[in-house]
Amino acid sequence: MRTIDINCDLGESYGAWRMGDDEGVMPHITSANVACGFHGGDPATIRRTVRLATEHGVAVGAHPSLPDLMGFGRRPMKITPDEAYDLVLYQAGAVQAFARAAGTRLAHVQCHGAFYNMAATDDALSDAIARAVRDLGDGVILYALSGSRMMAAGQRLGVRTLAEVFADRGYQDDGTLTPRTQKGAMIEDEAAAVAQAVGMVERGTVTSLAGRTVPVDAGTICLHGDQPGAVAFAKALRAAFRQRGIRVAAP
């Protein structure tokens, strides 16, 4: 039986500002990527999100970002590999502490937004991120874009690395995600997102925006919690996998 992990970016509220429906999404996923405060999230939000995940038996992950709260971490920024290492270790370490306090553990790290996309094509940044995940200890898994430099870096450094695909994002011919500034970057139609997800899991391919068939390795599949239809997407995705005999579980 095929097995797939469904992860979602959560805990992205900040202070009085609310982002997404974490309570609605949590029952339908298996891994939560908890914002660490640099693009969204704050200490109280991290604590609440970790507790909510623990109550639902959802694996707790850290979702570190570039230091860009105003831009929600989606603007590229020129950083050094040492800065990338520090950003991951600092932010993931905070979530790791909250997880320990809640009686669970930090299971994985999935970088956010521009940080994730920059590292996907940059060996030095990918190596730094993989080293930081390794140094967190406790068998923390690195979630990395399927076929990316980050995937290769994790494997090269002996870090357990899980190939990630996206249900609600458009793909380029080279397997990278379409920049959000371009048309087709987000898939807002539920049926289209589910069809893309099922195809990636069952056939190991995704169709790029230009119509090219791109090979992918689907170890975990991501949904974005800031999507207006995130809860409905999660429910539909879970139902589609169940109908096809695909087991849904955290790694």
Image (cartoon, grey):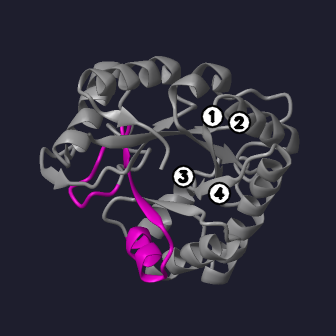
Q: In the figure, 139 relative to 64: above or below?
A: below
Label 2 with label 4: CB-CB less than 8 Å: no
- Is 22 a magenta residue? no
Residue extent of the magenta highlight: 149-176
Marks 1 and 4: which is nearer the front?
1
Measured as percent of width and height from the top left, residue 224 is found at 51, 36
**Residue receiving disc 1:** 57
- Is 173 a magenta residue? yes
The furthest residue to the front? 1
**Residue receiving disc 3:** 113
Label 4 with label 3: CB-CB less than 8 Å: yes
Distance CA(mark 2)–CA(mark 4): 23 Å
The reply to whether residue 10 is in sight is: yes
What's under tag 4, amino acid-wise? Answer: Ser
Q: Secondary structure at mark 2?
A: helix
Q: Who is closer to the viewer here, 146 or 16?
A: 146
Measured as percent of width and height from the top left, residue 213 is found at 12, 49
Q: Which mark is residue 243?
A: none
Total tally of numbered discs in the picture: 4
Q: Earlier in the sequence, mark 1 or mark 3?
A: 1
What residue is rendered at 44% in x and 44% in y? 180
What residue is rendered at 25% in x and 34% in y? 198
Distance CA(mark 3)–CA(mark 2): 25 Å
**Residue receiving disc 2:** 54
Q: Earlier in the sequence, mark 3 or mark 2?
A: 2
Q: Who is closer to the viewer here, 174 or 197?
A: 197
Q: Which mark is residue 65?
A: 4
Label 2 with label 1: CB-CB less than 8 Å: yes
Other-residue count near label 4 (Cα within 10 Å), few / some / many at <14 / 14–19 / ≥20: many
What's under tag 3, amino acid-wise? Answer: Gly
Q: Earlier in the sequence, mark 4 or mark 3?
A: 4
